[in-house]
Amino acid sequence: MNIVEKHRERCMECGQCLLVCSRYDNLSLLNRLYEYLEGSSNIHPDSLLRCLTCGLCVSACPEKLGIKPLISPARQKWVNENGLTDRQTMVDPEAENNLFKKIAEMDETLEFTNRSGSVVYFPGCAGTYINKVMAQASVALLEKAGVDYTVLSGTEYCCGAVSAGAGDPGPIRMHGQQNIEEIRKRRAKILITACPGCFRAFKDIYPRMFGKLDFEVLQVSQYLDRLLKEGKLTPENALKHRVFYHDPCHLTRGMGIYTEARNILEKIPGTELANRTPEGSACCGFGGGVRVNYPSESLSVASDRYRAAREMGCDVIVTNCGGCMQNLIEAGENENVRENIKIFDLTEYLALACGVKTDREDRKMIEIVNRAYSSCVSGYKKPYFS
């Protein structure tokens, strides 16, 4: 039974998926997707591009169906029929309009020592070029814990997951095996990733495409939680904040990882965690290409996370994803939204508790990212409050 037959047979059209969705409001979308995937009609790309691929619809559906499982194959079909657009190739390492290469022309790129190590840290493109504080804080914590590590960074080691999600599987096919071999060459026993997309690539997609990996794959929250339990890291500085932990969609609903970050936050002196479970978590608005295709709408979705944090009496939002961090920071530039709620990456927050400070230039990051988007994507409209 193919995806359309399965979906059509089991879907009760109860509308639970739409109740949690910030992007669609009409069940007629399901029939449009059915017909398009079966080849009986065409579809406007707007129907495909609005999806955040956050998985909230799947979680809400009594049959665990939702809209997302139809969007992904429909996007792939559309690309096969119409070809790649500049919005899809902008994260392809081989493309002329690669976003990260463009950012590297505008700003300094992080450099790491190339060596062997029992642990490979994989910061991903976001940690290398955009939210560099994520990589800086992670490396500082690895140093403090005395970990024998090495770093795999840069577009030459792009995992390809974002391109695949946009409908372009080329980069993941081209770079996947190369990345695996490079990690083996460095004799690593453990790979730790920052980006949830990179984590899914190594933990789920690569083994299915290239065979079982001979090293352990952990998201950075899992590895840092392990270091804390082993006593190799000790947060001694009190950070007196009530914290709202923002669950990244592709890490929480996509890969089932949500306890480790909370374990870390609850070990930090002075910190009070407001939301101890992912119940009620929602998307930051960045994913699925929505940030590029609908910039202002994307940041409007991110603004809702400030509302949720404010209602819980929080003065800090901590997240664990480069895309989430970028969108939350940018949405916070609207003074009506922010209300003095600060954004931290999980590694950055833990580093502060361990006595390590890393510098951030949020305004510079936002300006460079928007300039890069404008250079890489035709017709890109800068968000209304950036």
Image: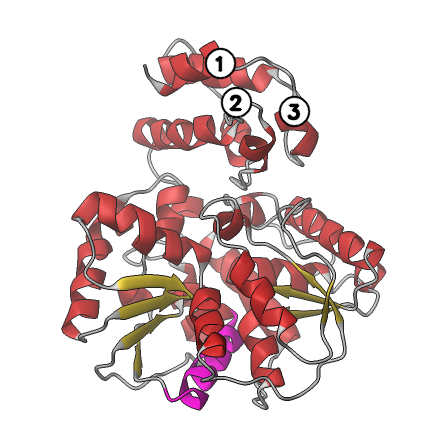
Q: Where is residue 273 in the image (x, y as percent from the top left)?
A: 71, 65
Give the camera-side residue of 124 and 141: 141
Q: Give the residue type at disc 2.
A: Glu
Give the alpha-carbon distance from disc 3 to disc 1, as whole Å.
14 Å
Q: Does the magenta stretch include residue 132?
A: yes
Q: Give the residue type at disc 1.
A: Arg
Q: Where is residue 15 in the image (x, y as percent from the top left)?
A: 65, 20
Q: Where is residue 39 in the image (x, y as percent from the top left)?
A: 36, 13
Residue 354 occupies which quadrant of the picture?
bottom right
The stretch of residues the image draws in magenta is: 131-146
Label 1: few (<14), some (14–19) or many (≥20) C-alpha neighbours in 10 Å? few
* Mark count: 3
Q: What scheme was used to colour the molecule?
A: secondary structure
Q: Give the residue type at disc 3.
A: Gln
Q: Mark 1 points at which residue?
A: 10
Q: What element carries label 2?
A: loop
The label number, if any, that marks residue 63 in the structure image: 2
Q: What element carries label 1?
A: helix
Which quadrant of the figure contains the C terminus?
bottom right
Q: In this view, does 377 lie to the left or right of 91?
A: right
Whether residue 97 is visible, yes or no, is no
Query: Residue visible at 62% across and 47% down?
Result: 283
Look at the numbered discs 2 and 1 and tell me whether their residues touch, using CB distance below 8 Å: yes
Q: Where is residue 335 in the image (x, y as percent from the top left)?
A: 82, 64
Q: Name the residue under label 3.
A: 16
Residue 26 occupies which quadrant of the picture?
top right
The label number, if any, that marks residue 18 in the structure image: none
Q: Does the magenta stretch include residue 24?
A: no
User: Overall secondary structure of the magenta stretch?
Assistant: helix
